Amino acid sequence: MDTRMDPKQLQELAGKHLWICFSELSGVRNSPMIVRGEGCYVYDSNGKRYLDGLAGLFLSNVGHGRGELADAAHEQMNELHFFPLWTFTHPKAIELAARLGELAPGDLNRVFFTTGGGEAVETAWKLAKQYFRAIGQPGRYKVISRQLAYHGTTLGALAITGYESMRAPYEPLPGGALHARTTDAYRAEEEGEALSEACAQDIERIILEEGPETVAAVFLEPVQNSGGCFPAPPGYFRRVREICDRHGVLLVSDEVICAFGRLGHVFACDRYDYIPDMITCAKGLTSGYVPLGATIVSDRMARPFLESGTTFMHGMTYGGHPVGCAVGLANIELIEKEDLCGRVREYEADFRAQLETLYDLPIVGDVRGEGYFYGIELVKDQETKQAFSEEECNRLLGDFLSPRLFELGLICRVDDKGEPVVQLSPPLTAGPEEFREITGILRQAFNEAWEMIVAGD
Ligand code: PLP
């Protein structure tokens, strides 16, 4: 018997019962319903096809509908659907931890599993605090991240998140989270190495003002997503690493988006040639087929716990779920077998070149990003970089561009945490054909948006 409901019934039920993320509750009923995915495309309940230019939510790295990952989940469920990593272990968690240890740079060898990215960030902060207690520096508890950066929504991760209006409803948040400037090369006065120096110095300024003996860790994404896809200018991470070392502060590479091929490397810190003390990851770890996150920790940080017998008083029932770990292993195998990191490195210039053809449109201010991860900043005046007013932004992004792009068959993110930026992060299986399709749809929507704004003046 087919018990499936028709789309209309489901949407009515959604309006009554479902509460979705970061959305007005009254709009749930009208939210598009995606029912199926295949490769770089997804399909809605009316059978309409969309190019998934965001890989779900920066995570379907191997693409949609991969039977290999479904098989891995199925096999694992039949063998051992669940056992906790509390007191016990299970083979897939051990194998995946060892695999991640092999793939991670330097002495990052020890893996604490979570169910997602925010928990991995939260884990890293708690671990940093307990590590410093264990080595006799209990005063170190503060953390530094960057303005506008998104690191998750649990209260600790939210405190690290540098986006004021996301934090405001939940204040007071755990104290000690401070925010340094972003590496926004488009709007900065400095360029290149000078920008790196200024941004790294801003982190050092905070460390010195707060007192190094109070600062535990710096959390940075290799390419900052939120606020508008800000890559690191040359030498930035080298300088930050030096500063962290000078002041005894840990460096956490938050690779929830950037790892597992997004920037052409399994771990994105390899692209920028720095070795952090911890890596937080999730999303692409399983390509989103099942929830799993991880905090990968250096041997140096694990040592005091090993030597003193200190217990890390932290965990979650589903952290390191056997099905998540089995899928994670199969996903890494696919990434390697299909050389998706190599593919990203091979085609990223083509992706960028396609997007850069949009510079002939007056609304396109800046195309920026790395790998398969780009942002396009929209401006009112290309020459002067004049930004849109808040009212124009709302009209342009929320009211027009988001629904129009969707209508034209492209799923991407229109972010307005800083200046308006259209974000793109397609599956790593995408290639020139998909880049052309993305660019064509953007061109049409940007042209229409420009006419609307100009006509509204
Ligand atoms: N850190 C970064 C850099 C992220 O982009 C995200 C989510 O997008 C998170 C943390 C939070 O991950 P999750 O939504 O799995 O909790």
Image (cartoon, rainbow, N blue to C red):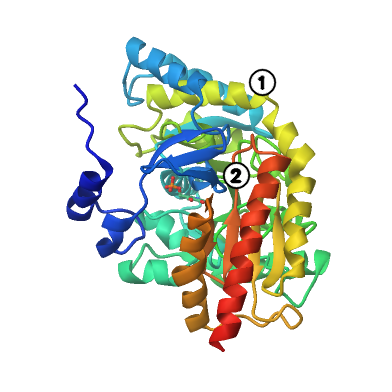
Quarter of the image containing the C terminus?
Answer: bottom right
Q: Which of the numbered marks, if any, corresponds to residue 157?
A: none
Query: Helix, strand or loop at disc 1?
Result: helix
Q: Nearer the viewer, residue 123 or 47?
A: 47
Residue type at the position of mark 1? Lys
Seen at 67% across and 54% down, the residue is 439
The residue that disc 2 covers is 426
Where's residue 42, x and y in %? 48, 40
Quick one: 115 or 414, which is closer to the camera?
A: 414
Q: Quadrant of the N terminus?
A: top left
Residue 1 in view (yes/no): yes
Task: Answer with the quarter of the image where residue 199 lies.
Answer: bottom right
Mark 2 or mark 1: whose residue is earlier in sequence: 1
Residue at horizontal 36 percent and vertical 42 percent from the top: 45
Task: Answer yes or no: is residue 211 visible.
Answer: no
Q: Residue 230, position in %: x, y? A: 66, 61
Residue hosting label 1: 337
| Left or right of residue 135: residue 430 | right
Farthest residue to the bottom: give it.
457
The spot of residue 430 in percent (x, y) is: 65, 38
